[in-house]
Amino acid sequence: MIVILKKNAEQQQVELFDNWLHSMGLETHKSIGENHTIVGLVGDTSRVDIESIMALDIVETVKRIQEPYKNANRKFHEQDTVITLSNGAKIGGGHFLVMAGPCSVETEEQIISVAQAVKAAGAEVLRGGAFKPRTSPYAFQGLHEEGIRLLLKAREATGLPIVTEIMDAKHLPLFEDIDIIQVGARNMQNFELLKDLGKLRKPVLIKRGMANTLQELLMSAEYVMAGGNDQVILCERGIRTFETATRNTMDLSVIPVLHQFTHLPVVVDPSHATGRWELVAPMALAGAACGADGLMIEVHNDPEHALCDGPQSLRPEKFASMMEKVRAIRPYADRSFTTGEGALG
């Protein structure tokens, strides 16, 4: 349920209204806009009498919300969420952010070299895997704690914040100094992990599962936000379809759809979506053009000898060329058509 307050509502009246709602066991989330304030009610609203609320002088209108995700819902929070990182970089609300780096951290020389290259090309976040979920138990699984240490060394050398994937809640102590914690496609519905991430106060990037709906993705974000952590970034990384020409099918249509239904930033990962380096730049440009808030790109200085996902990794010079094209196309990205109302079925 959302309550829209009148523009001239006095602060004292708003506080009394807020306290009354809390006395009924409800949580409230306020979104203050130029023309009105939206109060989102989270909890069991079945016993709330809409007519009683409508009778209050400060209330303009009341609406019941059918979608099961409340905190992530744009109806509760009209303004885009903007997340600010340690280096001052921002994502959301018109701020575009590029995260780039190798699929997997391999050596100190490798990760620092790639970090320096992607920073020079315009990336503002370093991505790199310390823990690697692999289909085969015999494939390279990452350097684990050593990989985290090397990522921190690269941050020290370049100043770039780090995004890296967590596999299990028991690893959380290792992620204490990580700037953005990534939840991979396979863990998107690891609800106990999401609950633990909700207790943190740092950005969490959630990748859409390869066979999950948008509502399921938003409900995963809701798990984190219900715990009090509202710094959530959503990521489209391709879904599994009958097509085999690419690693996955990159569903760019979800970008404007997600912007209709949520205030959270949305990024695209064309590397995992396509699985082929020559397709990464075209799909990155398409993602930027259709209103994504950022990109997640795999870059490796020696893809042919990469321990993980070399075929989908750009060389630093290819990444730099792609970034020039992204900067050229960004001014033409139009999100004015994504703000309409709707509901996910």
Image: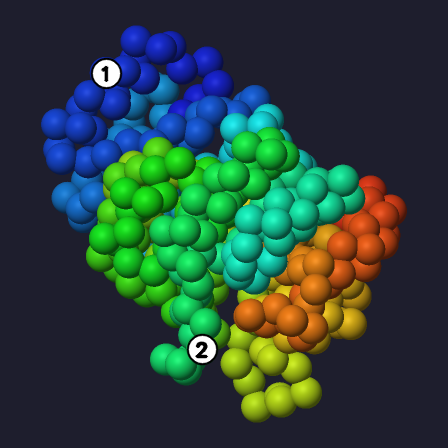
Evaluate whether residue 264 shows in this view.
Answer: no
Mark 2 lies on residue: 139
Tell whether 214 sits left or right of 243: left
Q: Nearer the viewer, residue 324 or 138?
A: 138
Q: N-terminal of the two: label 1 or label 2?
A: 1
What distance separates the C-alpha of mark 1 from that of mark 2?
A: 59 Å
Q: Residues within 10 Å of mark 1 (few under 14, many from 20)?
A: few
Mark 1 lies on residue: 16
**Is the Cβ of the residue at disc 1 closer than 8 Å to that at disc 2?**
no
- Residue in the picture at 60% in, 34% down: 157
Q: Nearer the viewer, residue 254 or 98?
A: 98
Quarter of the image where the C terminus is located: bottom left
User: Relative to 251, does residue 77 appear above or below in the rendering?
Assistant: above
- Residue in the picture at 35% in, 34% down: 201
SS class, disc 2: loop
The location of residue 133, given as percent across then percent down, is 41, 69
Three-letter amino acid code at the position of disc 2: Ala
- Residue in the picture at 45% in, 52% down: 147
